[in-house]
Image (spheres, rainbow, N blue to C red):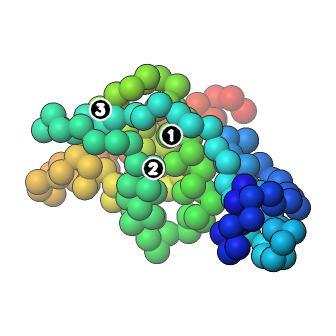
């Protein structure tokens, strides 16, 4: 690896750590010529994944768009950034496992909503209201009723298990 300060071609690796569930490596390096320390990241090069939008346009998959959407949905909620990043990691992994080169934005949105409903119900409703483009209060209420019904079924299953 070339030193970013002096351009020397042979730097030393001081420390290596796995990042993002073993899909990338963070390396701390030191240049023997100028003693500059710097960090590099090494990750698996994957084939580009294209997202097919509702209007038919295609654009590259961008995990930051999902992350930003989840951060907005979880704003002022007791959800840690680590939990949000774990959701994004799980979604990206699921998308890459199921789809070779293209995935619809609808599939991504449904994955986000299914994961988010487990993390925080309020954040789920916020995300769903934007994703599903609620036009009136009735659509919002229908979604809330659906959440309540699922929660009731979940509680009944817990009680039967006891």
Q: Residues within 10 Å of mark 1 (few under 14, many from 20)?
A: some
Q: Do the residues labelled 1 and 3 touch (CB within 8 Å)?
A: no
7 or 89: nearer the viewer: 7
Q: Name the residue under label 3.
A: 104
Residue 81 appears anywhere in the view: yes
The percent position of residue 86, horizontal first and vertical second, equals: 60, 50
Can you tell which mark lies on residue 92?
1
Nearer-N-terminus badge (1/3): 1
The percent position of residue 7, horizontal first and vertical second, equals: 68, 67
Q: Mark 2 points at which residue?
A: 63
Identified at 67% across, 48% down, the residue is 42
The quarter holding residue 54 reads: top left
Label 1 vs label 3: CA separation? 13 Å
Quadrant where the N terminus sits is bottom right
* Circle 1: element type: helix
The percent position of residue 16, horizontal first and vertical second, equals: 83, 54
Q: Do the residues labelled 1 and 2 touch (CB within 8 Å)?
A: yes
Identified at 39% across, 26% down, the residue is 101
Nearer-N-terminus badge (1/2): 2
Where 130 falls versus 21 (above or below)? below
78 or 153: nearer the viewer: 78
* Circle 2: element type: helix
> Would residue 140 be found to the left or right of residue 73 on screen?
left
* Circle 3: element type: strand
Q: Residues within 10 Å of mark 3 (few under 14, many from 20)?
A: some
Identified at 11% across, 54% down, the residue is 135
The percent position of residue 6, horizontal first and vertical second, equals: 70, 73
């Amino acid at each position: 690896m070339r030193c970013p300060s002096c351009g020397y071609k042979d730097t030393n690796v001081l420390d290596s750590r796995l990042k993002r569930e073993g899909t990338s490596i963070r390396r701390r390096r030191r240049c023997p010529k100028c003693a500059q320390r710097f960090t590099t990241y090494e990750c698996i090069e994957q084939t580009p994944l294209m997202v097919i939008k509702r209007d038919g346009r295609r654009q590259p998959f961008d995990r930051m768009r999902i992350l930003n959407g989840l951060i907005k949905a979880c704003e002022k909620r007791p959800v840690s950034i680590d939990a949000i990043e774990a959701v994004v990691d799980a979604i990206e992994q699921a998308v890459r496992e199921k789809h070779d080169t293209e995935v619809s934005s609808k599939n991504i949105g449904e994955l986000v909503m299914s994961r988010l409903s487990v993390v925080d119900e309020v954040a789920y409703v916020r995300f769903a209201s934007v994703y599903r483009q609620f036009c009136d209060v009735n659509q919002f209420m229908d979604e809330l009723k659906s959440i309540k019904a699922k929660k009731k079924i979940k509680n009944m299953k817990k009680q039967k298990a006891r």
